[in-house]
Amino acid sequence: MTRMVEFTDTEFMIAQGARLLEDGRTFFVGWGIPQVVAILAQKLYVPNVIQLFEFGAIGPQSVLPFVRGTMGGPQNTYRSLQWLNMNWAFAYSAAGYMDYGMLGALQVDPYGNINSTFLGGTYRMPKRRFAGSGGGNQVASQCWKTIIVIRHEGRRFVPKVDFLTSPGYLTGPGAREKAGLPAGTGPYRVVTSKGLFGFDDETKQMTLLAVLRGLDPGEVVRDMAFRPLISKDIAEISPPTEEELHLLREEIDPSRFLIRGEQMSAPA
Amino acid sequence: MRILKEGEIEYRFEHPDDFRRFVRDKRSRKPEPKLRPAKEAVSAFVSDGDYLVYDFSSLTRGPQSLIREVIRQRRKDLWIGAEFTLHESALLTGAGCATRIDVGFLGYGSYIGQAVCEGKVRVYDWTNGGLALRLLAGARGVPFLPTRDLLGSDNMAVSAAKVIEDPYTGLPLAAVPALNPDVAFLHVHQADIYGDARIFGTNLFALEAAMASHRVIVSAEEIVEPEEFRKDPMRTTIPYFLVDAVVHAPFGAYPGAMPARYEIDLPHIDILNGIRNEEQMQKYLHDNIYSVADHEEFLDRRVGSAKMKELRGRATIIEGYR
């Protein structure tokens, strides 16, 4: 009988995100889950990744455990190459030095446009208001490849976002460049709690590339409020490994503040 | 220069020549002792209707004792500008002090989100990069600075950023207007009595905010001798002639952390995160701000020496900080 692995949806997204990064590259780290992705990736897969935080930490090394509520404190600026400030941090992305950026999202549309500002109603009278851009707009505008991390709930994948906080491919091919955004940039992957999406070279539309082992691709896209493209060869994503889970649960986030979530299981 | 797109949104703006004249005529260059109690400094330099900017957040090195003093003095109709307006924006809104907020990252706890939905406070989304650039423009004496973000996003429509035609490439370019706040708050590790100040670690826009603002209040964990700055000028964050008042405020960032000095008080942060309605907000304000005379009494009666000792003891990473 196949052994099943138990994990949370958050743990799966973090593990997937960590596997996507390349060693020796630069990585602009957003607030929340991307912080934990950066720590896991640096510890397990990409020791020479250069993390960068908008609050001016250039190339910090990760301190364990992750302490919630730290922002620009000693824990996430530890052993940096350089300590600066926000204008200089965004200079690194604006001038083309940042290979990857990673952001969370409330909603995402077929072109990878991100909403993190409000849901429902209007901008002045929203039904629910959230944090907004922070530095997300700069990350999505300026990094070469942006990775979006979003829980796989159908209502989060919408034909049109309620508010376009951070740009994906806007309205399609060439739209970013036409708007004046730096050429050759844009969303690269969307990591969800069920699968992995990329963007079609020609149409710039979200395309399902892979699903968690044991899941049916048709099932994965069924409840999404827009229909993504589906790659001809859907790859299989292995669930979080023992090593990833051990590091996450015992060393990075023993208080389970960030890694908690909905329970899932998949064949090991 | 051609304007390709612009929103009609209210924003704080001052002609660079007006700000330069203010700097020439109203900002003293004399090394005068400026050490004052927070009560006096806030009373002298923060007025109803002011635009207030501050560095960092309620989690890290935020000027929390000065913000509590503003609330205690019940200032009205403030316009707040900050990258991470976390618990401060909720408290200032709940206390009836703030009516407009430029962000940034608006958050923590459901109170502030509800306040926006109910129209208690107006929010303008400039993004973190946009606000930092506005202060840089204010500090550089130019009316605006261009940038290649914001473009194509809805933040463009709900801030007063404009899309202009770049005179060099002909491409669309975003422009954000300079920001010259009425007053800036900076909480620092060390200051002298004249206002020279040092921040250890990273900052968001400390120097930009100090140079761009009409008045600057520095609160400091520690007051040091002026000659310390002359001996180690690389470590000066803010020179004294940008500063109007110095407040000695140990634990001034509490309940947030002061890097390498004390750690964040998470149970207290959880109380702030848990504020969901008006009753809880008013109770918090009463217990922690209105019912104590000043920061010293707050530390003495509400925080206590055992807690402060514990938080100091948890600040174990000191490498890189001096």
Image (cartoon, coloured by chain):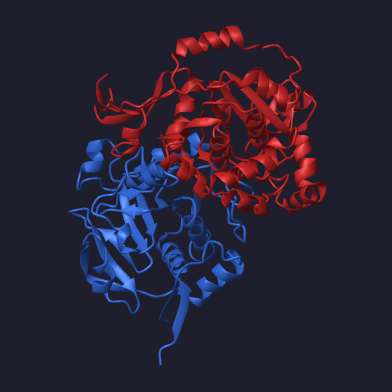
Chain colours: A blue, B red
Q: Image check: A221 left or right of A125?
A: left
Q: Image check: B89 left or right of B189?
A: left
Rendered position, A113 above or below A211: above
User: Quick check: can you spot residue A223?
Assistant: yes
Q: Image check: A212 left or right of B58?
A: left
Residue A194: x and y in percent read 35, 69
The number of callouts visible is 0
Q: Residue at x 53, y 61 (%)?
A: A258
Q: Residue at x 53, y 31 (%)?
A: B98
Q: Residue furthest front?
A: B279
Q: Nearer the viewer, residue B50 or A139?
A: B50
Q: Residue at x 35, y 77 (%)?
A: A213
Image quarter for residue A195? Answer: bottom left
Image quarter for residue B149? Answer: top left
Image quarter for residue A158? Answer: bottom left
Rendered position, A69 above or below A230: above
User: Quick check: can you spot residue B148?
Assistant: no
Q: Residue furthest left?
A: A202
Residue B202: x and y in percent read 60, 40
Q: Image check: B6 left or right of B206?
A: left
Q: Nearer the viewer, residue A154 or B55?
A: A154
Residue B146: x and y in percent read 37, 27
